[in-house]
Image: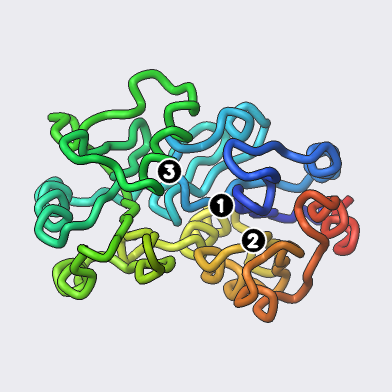
Amino acid sequence: MNRKLLFFDIDGTLLAGGIPGYIPESAIQALKTAQKNGHYIFINSGRTYSFMPKLIRDFPFDGYICGCGTEVILHGETIFHHEIPKELQLRMKDVLKETRIQGVFEGHSACYYNYDETFLPPLAHIYESYTKIEMEDAARSFDDPELDFDKFVIITDENSDLERFYALTEKDFQLMGAPKRRPYGFGEAVPKECSKASGIDVVVKHLGLSLDDCYVFGDAPNDLSMLRHVKNSVAMGNAFPEILGETSYVTTPVDRDGIYVALKHFGLI
């Protein structure tokens, strides 16, 4: 069997309609047909497992690359997990306070929020979305004694000292996104060893296949590492402009049968 590995971002790629969003029926049928044809289907997301929407967790994916490659799950088993040293995790709380930046620490089982501050509007939106995930005890405090995270999100405003944040974190983390956007910026701080591309490498090695067997689907800047990593890469028609020139194929938007059209184009269904 000429089995292929298919990797999908979530928001704007599989999910349409914003947050919480929905999977278009054409995408559902395309994914099921791809599996029936013997192909593996994976989520490859910036979200950690605790932040996966319920409709994504309930779908029978073969595996998940979570948190920009910080955890890889195959058939319900974690086959890779990058652990941030506890001392470094605790230090990040002080860094956010010193640089006047708000954030969310994202882990496998929970996300952690600083309840001592009034959330900036983008963080309030993230929190509201997260509380709909329907995982028990998944929203916790920065002060939780069991604090354990794989990556974190930052929200900046005009009071934030982003340059100081870079200086304090650049040794251990890479920052993706648009943290300088006004009035609020958004960024993802990911351990330097990890990316959506490194997660693909873990899966490929584990299954004894090759990058030539991989197809990746994305729409946003944090998808660039995986889109540039394999030759069969797909940008959704609704993708950010900087994505559209980086892939081997551009499909229609997610809400206009984009997944179905792409899988049909490559002969996967």
User: Measured from the top left, where is residue 45 in percent x and y?
Assistant: 52, 51
Residue labelled with disc 3: 48
Q: Which mark is residue 218?
A: 2
User: Measured from the top left, where is residue 219 in percent x and y?
Assistant: 64, 62
224 horizontally vs 180: left or right: right
Q: Give the mark, 1 or 2, whose residue is nearer the N terminus.
A: 1
Q: Which residue is pictured at 27% across the width and 37% down the height?
A: 112
81 horizontally vs 21: left or right: left
Q: Secondary structure at mark 3?
A: loop
* Direction bottom: furthest residue: 245
In this rendering, the answer to whether 195 lies above or below 89 is below
Q: Are marks 1 and 2 in contact (CB under 8 Å)?
A: yes
The one of 196 and 222 positioned closer to us in this rendering: 222
Q: Which residue is pictured at 18% across the width and 68% down the height?
A: 161
Distance between the alpha carbons at the discs numbered 1 and 3: 10 Å
Residue labelled with disc 1: 44
The one of 9 and 126 positioned closer to us in this rendering: 126
The one of 248 and 180 positioned closer to us in this rendering: 180
Q: Residues within 10 Å of mark 1 (few under 14, many from 20)?
A: many
Q: Residues within 10 Å of mark 3 (few under 14, many from 20)?
A: many
Q: Amino acid at mark 1?
A: Asn
